[in-house]
Image (cartoon, rainbow, N blue to C red):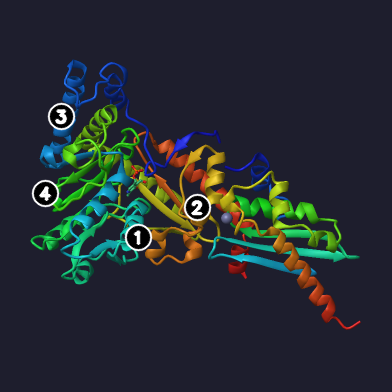
Amino acid sequence: MYSELVMDHFSNPRNVGTIADADGVGTVGNPVCGDLMKIFIKVKDEHIEDIKFQTFGCGAAIATSSMVTEMVKGKTLEEAEAVSNKAVAEALGGLPPQKMHCSNLAADGVHEAIKDYRSKVAGKVE
Amino acid sequence: MEKRTVYMDHAATTPVHPKSLEAMLPYFSEKYGNPSSIYGVARESRKALDDAREAVAGILGAKTTEIIFTSGGSEGDNAALKGTAFASKSKGNHIITSSIEHHAVLHTCHFLEKFGFEVTYLPVDNYGIVDPDELARAITDKTILVSIMMANNEVGTVQPIAEIGKLLKGKNITFHTDAVQAAGALPLDVNDLGVNLLTLSAHKFYGPKGVGILYLKRATPFLAQQQGGGQERNRRAGTENVPGIVGMTTALKLAVENLESNNRHNTQLRERLVKGVLGSVSKVRYNGHQTKRLPNNVNLSFEYVEGESILLNLDMMGVAASSGSACTSASLEPSHVLMAMGIPVEIAHGSLRLTLGASNTEEDVDYVVSLLPGIVERLRAMSPLAAQAAQ
Ligand SMILES: Cc1ncc(COP(=O)(O)O)c(C=O)c1O
Ligand SMILES: [Zn+2]
């Protein structure tokens, strides 16, 4: 059902965990649909300096979370914003069709985290 | 620990018993005649079919004319419901079933709703049991059919079929039970159960796939769902699956003969498995009823983790099991059975079904028990729900 790469990310997920003093946090999905992802980012000079995730979900949900963290780590915010859910699935060598929806939201999670960071920056008095 | 291969998904399907396979083999290339023909090789098939029908009828306490051979559980359920509903339309249009039936029954009910039938889906209690009093209250003068499964495929809960049979007696309402999961674990005498129709599927009792039995009591309204040749007394057209029927009958005989010893074996392993998991993992629920359940069924929910992730981890360690999580179904919804039992949705996602069988040993059980704590712990360590709960 899953490609070898998906299984690799599922069994050895990269960047699992939290960042206590994260600059942005994004949460997507919900436990009712069976997949919930939380992405934490640390931003420096408009770059994603560090990124961690926590995921409740199936193999696809965990693998896409892990993959997206690898794809955007060290990238500029703009570059990270251009990474789509579809691109994550492609980077994993594809996902089964029924997994393309709720289980494939990790890129949205990153976008949410960036949005959270931007809103915090905007709120700050210079 | 050494990796093992452990099959604990016997509710999904079972391996064919060697004696069942042996019984089938001559009917592929040696005794291949069409039972409807008149020459020698066909007479052999006819004889095998007649003998099988007699044996099955004997086991069910039925007449040979009341046995219809089918292609399995889904066909049996479809034929039972549609056959009865369409034949009884002049009398009424109301059907009563439960909310925990297999999709072969539930989706057939949805289909019938499109043709003007009205269906009551009875709720179940927290253990997954239908209340016969509630069923009695749901009956109207339009009720033509009641379909309640004998044992549930996900949580193994056993329903009070004989009691429902009694309360329907003399009411002129057709009573069907899907006994697909019950075969080999519970007695199947149709008179004791008080049913008009009963569905069985061979691959759940160590017989081959794609063959089954529909018991149809004499004088029950029934409209054949498959037209063609006159096979099965015009109730199910199509050249009979002779090898499958022979294999199924051998498997059914063995299942019934060894029912008690198989139940003892499975119950003992089940108790060991449940005790082992509940004793080594926190925040886990044992779904279903403690005693009114199939001897081979274990259904557990692990909080904060999702079922498919557990299955994938078990699979990597050689263990085959199943889950009621949405992520393992095409429907993107968690198990309708667990939901009907009032289990919170996020907990239903974390369900694991382990169904035991003949080949399983204490070593298999201990192996699974040794794996689960680590798997669950690892998944919880990356779960935002576990982190939330810990705060
Ligand atoms: C309770 C129940 N009914 C019906 C079926 C369908 O049987 P089959 O696979 O033979 O079509 C199954 C099998 O999954 C079942 O468990
Ligand atoms: Zn999923």
Would the CB of label 3 be found within 8 Å of ligand 1? no
Q: Quadrant of residue B290?
A: bottom left
Return the mark for residue B330. 2
Q: Position of residue B65 (x, y in %)?
A: 12, 39
Q: Position of residue B388 (x, y in %)?
A: 61, 68
SS class, disc 1: helix
Looking at marks 4 and 1 on the same chain, the residue that comes earlier in the sequence is marked by 1
Depth check: B127 or B230 in front?
A: B230
Q: Are marks 3 and 1 in contact (CB under 8 Å)?
A: no
> What residue sits 60% from the left and 58% below the top?
A101
Q: Which residue is most to the left?
A: B170
Q: Which residue is most to the bottom?
A: A125
Can residue B245 be seen by looking at this rendering? Answer: yes
Q: Are marks 2 and 3 in contact (CB under 8 Å)?
A: no
Looking at marks 2 and 3 on the same chain, the residue that comes earlier in the sequence is marked by 3
Can residue A18 be seen by looking at this rendering? Answer: no
Residue position marked by numbered label 4 in the rendering: B191
Residue position marked by numbered label 1 in the rendering: B110
